[in-house]
Image: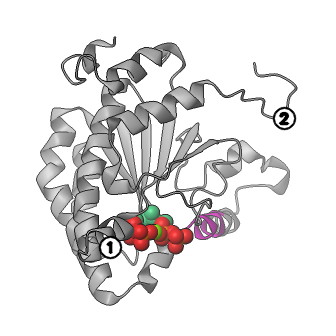
Amino acid sequence: MWESLKGYIKPGSEEERLVREIDMARLPRHIAVIMDGNGRWAARRGRARVEGHKAGSESVREAAETCARLGISYLTLYAFSKENWKRPRPEVIRLWRLLRDSLKTDGRLFMENNLRLTAIGQRPGIPRLVLKEIERLEKATERNSRMTLILALNYGGRAEILEAVGRILRSRTVRPQDLDEEHFSGFLYTGGIPDPDLLIRTSGEMRVSNFLLWQIAYTELWITPVLWPDFRRKDLFEAVVDYQKRDRRFGDVQSR
Ligand code: IPE
Ligand code: IPE
Ligand code: MG
């Protein structure tokens, strides 16, 4: 078993069994997650939706630590979509406050674990104090190299593509004949980051909800009925095990 997972995984547990099934030489480089189901988790317990978001923050910590220990290079978490502004104002306020608090309290974990933080999404529109905290952590962690945690905040996939087109038109340096897929990708928020190999969605919803529309062209999808606050290490290992059984053909007749 991988050195960094020793002591972290309970011996004889289901998670240990799953970890042993993982081929460490063929890990996904980039995992993206649509963290969904916080509201339903709370409703099932007769609690306010915000309690679900609070419980969900614990799953974020666990997923980030597990991915880093496993050796994943990039983890992208969908935390707030452009469409989430439609929610009742008090929920929106609590969501952003929760995020700011987590970034504040967990900020040191990024340095302790050599993690880099970066955010994707429309920065104008993100509450000022949250943005300040994000930009402070982005700067502080820019040289960290173990894993990059990408937070999608005020993020919309279509908006991202439109913004990229706008940047290209304004730049006036890109000639239409030079604009291939790789070049275009560089204008997205995720420029320089490889496309996700695996996209996980919790809570069983079979949709992508405007997440990374360009980048997931050939991403493997894994959808689980587990609600985000219940998402544990073993669920992540299960996703990776399943991912490694897939035949990624990229349009060819066999995988290479
Ligand atoms: C995901 O959980 C968190 C965010 C979208 C911010 P939801 O709040 O969407 O939970 P459900 O889907 O209503 O259960
Ligand atoms: C997607 O979840 C957005 C995030 C996880 C941040 P939603 O709960 O907003 O998606 P829909 O409305 O069910 O498509
Ligand atoms: Mg939802």
Q: Is residue 55 above or below residue 231?
A: below
Residue annotated with mark 2 = 251
Residue 142 visible here: no
Name the spot of residue 225 as percent of width and height, x first: 49, 53
Q: Is mark 2 within 8 Å of ligand 2?
A: no
Local packing at callout 2 (Cα closer than 10 Å; few below 14, some 14-19, many 20+) is few
Residue annotated with mark 1 = 43
Q: Nearer the viewer, residue 182 or 250?
A: 250
Q: Nearer the viewer, residue 83 or 122?
A: 83
Instruction: Name the amino acid, label 2.
Output: Gly
Tell me the SS state at disc 2. loop
Instruction: Name the amino acid, label 1.
Output: Ala
Q: Is residue 72 above or below residue 108?
A: above
Residue at 21% x, 67% y: name it: 98
Name the spot of residue 123 as percent of width and height, x first: 40, 69
Name the spot of residue 158 as percent of width and height, x first: 63, 68
Q: Earlier in the sequence, mark 2 or mark 1?
A: 1
Residue at 14% x, 57% y: name it: 104
Residue 8 visible here: yes
Q: Is mark 1 within 8 Å of ligand 1?
A: yes
Local packing at callout 1 (Cα closer than 10 Å; few below 14, some 14-19, many 20+) is some
- Write the start and end of the magenta stretch as one range: 156-164
